[in-house]
Image (cartoon, coloured by chain):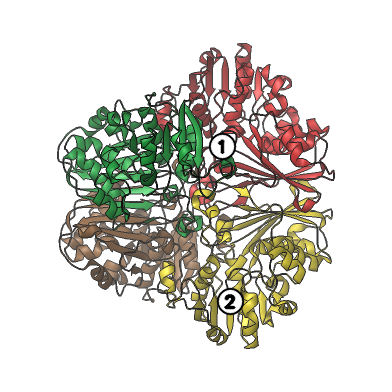
Chain colours: A brown, B yellow, C red, D green
Amino acid sequence: MIKIGIVGGTGYTGVELLRLLAMHPQADLQVITSRGEAGRPVADLFPSLRGHIDLAFSEPDDDALKACDLVFFATPNGTAMKSAPVLLAANTRVIDLAADFRISDQAVWEQWYGMTHASPELLPDAVYGLPEINRESIRGAMLVANPGCYPTATILGYLPLAQKGLIEGPLIADCKSGVSGAGRGANVGTLMAECGESFKAYAVAGHRHLPEIRQVLGSIMGGEPAMTFTPHLLPMIRGIHATLYSQVTSDTDLQALYEDFYADEPFVDVLPYGCHPETRSVRGVNRCQIAVHRPQGGDTVVALSVIDNLVKGAAGQAVHNMNLMFGLDESMGLDHVALAP
Amino acid sequence: MIKIGIVGGTGYTGVELLRLLAMHPQADLQVITSRGEAGRPVADLFPSLRGHIDLAFSEPDDDALKACDLVFFATPNGTAMKSAPVLLAANTRVIDLAADFRISDQAVWEQWYGMTHASPELLPDAVYGLPEINRESIRGAMLVANPGCYPTATILGYLPLAQKGLIEGPLIADCKSGVSGAGRGANVGTLMAECGESFKAYAVAGHRHLPEIRQVLGSIMGGEPAMTFTPHLLPMIRGIHATLYSQVTSDTDLQALYEDFYADEPFVDVLPYGCHPETRSVRGVNRCQIAVHRPQGGDTVVALSVIDNLVKGAAGQAVHNMNLMFGLDESMGLDHVALAP
Amino acid sequence: MIKIGIVGGTGYTGVELLRLLAMHPQADLQVITSRGEAGRPVADLFPSLRGHIDLAFSEPDDDALKACDLVFFATPNGTAMKSAPVLLAANTRVIDLAADFRISDQAVWEQWYGMTHASPELLPDAVYGLPEINRESIRGAMLVANPGCYPTATILGYLPLAQKGLIEGPLIADCKSGVSGAGRGANVGTLMAECGESFKAYAVAGHRHLPEIRQVLGSIMGGEPAMTFTPHLLPMIRGIHATLYSQVTSDTDLQALYEDFYADEPFVDVLPYGCHPETRSVRGVNRCQIAVHRPQGGDTVVALSVIDNLVKGAAGQAVHNMNLMFGLDESMGLDHVALAP
Amino acid sequence: MIKIGIVGGTGYTGVELLRLLAMHPQADLQVITSRGEAGRPVADLFPSLRGHIDLAFSEPDDDALKACDLVFFATPNGTAMKSAPVLLAANTRVIDLAADFRISDQAVWEQWYGMTHASPELLPDAVYGLPEINRESIRGAMLVANPGCYPTATILGYLPLAQKGLIEGPLIADCKSGVSGAGRGANVGTLMAECGESFKAYAVAGHRHLPEIRQVLGSIMGGEPAMTFTPHLLPMIRGIHATLYSQVTSDTDLQALYEDFYADEPFVDVLPYGCHPETRSVRGVNRCQIAVHRPQGGDTVVALSVIDNLVKGAAGQAVHNMNLMFGLDESMGLDHVALAP
């Protein structure tokens, strides 16, 4: 059993991590901290966990966390970078579900996140936790930067094209997310009466996931691609749909390319030719479903990629990384069937 | 492994049954029939099942079904009553998720369902599959009538009061259901543009679940109670919330009564005093959460009962019944955590 | 033209009032105050009002308000009771859309609202602004207490029975509201990820609208009725549905009773026998649709009553009251057609 | 008063047209036909219209329609092209809300719509009813082809760029529509349990609105642009959001360009720099709100354009066309305020 700590488990990423760990046969949850809810039973805040999680939230406590084999940070950006050094020094591994270690270039990170990085010395050894790219590095990692939700859907959708060098011209990633991606904070903008029955784009001028996507694709393409990334807010709770455009002049059989590329990946599922993935088909599970189209046989390729932002886009991918880091079967605790309808 | 057949697996009850059986360690799905979709891979119709269910729908075929240990009917009312005799004669057990065997009085059934019953001789031996009432009878049953969704939520909410003889005066069951309860048929009334962002009652003059509820409570109370049952359609997909009123003059500690009554039940969870259950806290799981209130200390008791209509209200309860009928651990394959948010 | 001021126009009641007044031929909006948004153009906060409302929010300013013929308070409870005396002394009429003047018994108000009333001397002259009951008093009123949303739907649903003395036994009002009724405050509980795709009751132990309903029905019935009032939160934005139960032993033709009772009311529409009103059919309009049922011809009557909580349950009724107070045609500016679907 | 007939008023376009005409001071609705609902009062099918529309649906009847000044076709594709010649010969004007007269090239139309055109001789005189382009031609037209919903949002979003010759490279129109755009037909795919809480693209290989958009933009640009058009289905009822990409190397001030271009248009509203339009801000009204962005000052321009698909995308634009054809004030009956929230 892996002794596990969670820092900051009161948000949606946290409760989803709790849900998955409660069903994981090798997870032994020891401690979960929250300043705001310390002392309160977890299942009191989240009645869906009654009978599954018996812990109460506790005050942040380095000693309790250092006694764990692994600590997940399900905190706002800027928290894990302060606490990670102490834990790593105690040989406790760390998976950060926030963005502190996702960007390897400190200056770029500081520009987009508006903070000074507290532990830049850790950046070179932090592994970007997208198993489809970094599986082997993750196995040996002490510190994993769990990818962002949009980057997961977007990178997986472009990856076969990028790896084969087929991408030409600027990329356009038109992405849509359910509101759980905006977190459990009390904001007017994500009230149901504000974002229900409506749809809009946001952060068109620039979103923090843009440099993350460009960095990762750039490392594969041998240079960061020009990209326009447009996030939108969907009137629903879970799910990301990335509609990904690229110019491609090669006459490669793209369906075969995608199917071959992901043939051995347990959590990426390429749909048959002509399909349109739906976010509900991956609801609650650690899976990315992808379809690739080439409308009217032209030079614009349209890849459609869906994930559950809280699972493959956050907590599920974190558990996948945990499985890799501790030598478990990759799919352990992650083989559920999506909840549809 | 239990060899399983499903008749009519293209509706919501059917696909939910497939989801649960795909995760059940003792279920060996052998055949699934559908006239309309015969020949089509199940995972083609339901992409959420890709990689989990490899069968294709087949034409109805008695021989294939008779070779199973158990056949589930996820069909419209009136189908199972025609096929059950053949299967039972072949020693294949049957769980009907429709209503054919729920009402023990043939005349009452025929009046409410508007059909002549094809197998009235089976009615005396059919067991009403609510394990919280009929656990022992279910274990030995060849034919189980899986309860309706509203009756499950309503009966469990009233049960402690009924068993203790505390109910006085007419009962009022004000119930609300998500639209998946109306099925996957192509009807204008359940289009999203019709029932989204709106709310209404329906069938106020009389709904088929009323005689079912009255029969079951009546068997416990020693006579059918007067009851008004008002179903409503919620603008959401899954979930039933029953708001249950009864006059009670006894000064019994109702919180203690409910907690004691359900203490050993694996799938009924009585919430702490003062709580209000939410349907999302049982989304996707075989659980009923209940709270009991007595506003202003008066004589009107308000019990709040929530289930997922497709799980505890249909497919999950059917799997629970299967577990009982085949001597398995009751909770086998049913110990998932609800998907919230 | 009526010179109008609005205090506190940044909530949902406020923006709905702005919408209706922008389309009202006799409304001349002079000032709208908001501490938090002072200086900001109204149409900047609410882009739906671009081109219709050119004002900016201003700091609260008694002189500007006193120069108006009428001031609406779309504020939290406890604000209007402090400002009303000054305005009334200046001969400016007041309509309070909050609860400060709805309960005529000061002690009852203070108990339910947890505050000391700042202007108890105004209570005797405040008129409860439900035109179907108090039309004549409203015409002459200086101070109108605009009814609560649940009370409007509930009282109108019971009114014909109450007036005819047909009600027997305790009343049960099972009410459901869209989330806009909870206001535009930043609360976790009304985030879309919390209340979307879910349903629950709340405040079952006691809700502030209960004494309001009992007071008004009591004034008609000659004594306050016993009542259980259960509010629920719907996963949608606008609309209230009240499902209203009463014991009635009289064999009065209830359909005829309701139709006759409301025959001359411009904003109450009794549906034909057997109908089930839907909240969407009154979306955006100042109308209450009602149907009355007597299931199985028994003694339990079920009245179904729907309104748009922001219109007939708040801003629309306030404009109706304004029309009455200023001698305009009752329906002026309120004759729109509901937005369905 | 304009004597009006409607053919096929039982779909969402039809009921929206009824809603708008009921509030139009010059509309005199004489006849509304429906084979399926003949004899049934309109307000029985659509209770939101009670008290506003007193007609009953009638059987199709050329004489009754020929007696009208104007006939709207709110029918499936392929109906208006059969009936229009008779009406035009009787000097009755026609507005077709379907697609029969939108494509001027008969061969292109027949290819995309899979039918032989019944009245190709009318194509040269049919006017494409987008007033922002064809205002003058519409004034004199006998036959108007009301634009499609996606084309309206897309063309208006690209129009200033197209007119100024700024568009370079292939266009990408990533569009999202609420489910009312799919009509009121009983299809499994638009059941709430299918498309609620989910999101997907559809018809990526080719949608009928693509040739319409290319034709109209092509007539302005002097040649049809290369374009990828990707429609998606939103889990909500009303609203279209078009996210429109174009390469632009010119350093023109795009904000000023858009504001100037639409300065005199009553139904197009360019939002201030940096805004993101929301579909709810145009819910129920004949308005298009647009914002134009140039992320990171690069060469990719992102125009965001929102409409209500049933109003500016269908019935509202049809009424606008009616106003123009009959010499009325353009905004007559169309000056409502959007229903938000």
Quarter of the rendering containing residue A246: bottom left
Q: Secondary structure at mark 1?
A: loop
- Viewer-nearest residue: B9 or C15: B9
Give the residue at mark 2: B72
Dot 2: chain letter: B
The dot on residue C160 is none
In the depicted structure, whether residue D337 falls above or below residue B216? above
Q: Amino acid at mark 1?
A: Leu
Give the residue at mark 1: D55
Left or right of residue D248: residue C108: right
- Viewer-nearest residue: C266 or D276: C266
Residue contact at pointers 1 and 2, CB within 8 angstroms: no
Q: Is residue A93 visible from the viewing direction of this image?
A: no
Q: Amino acid at mark 2?
A: Phe
Q: Is residue A49 visible from the viewing direction of this image?
A: yes
Q: Residue drawn at (68%, 16%), measured in percent from left and top? A: C140
In the image, residue D294 lies at what x, y percent? 23, 40
Q: Are marks 1 and 2 on the same chain?
A: no
In the image, residue B153 lies at what x, y percent? 67, 61
In the image, residue D248 lies at what x, y percent? 17, 41
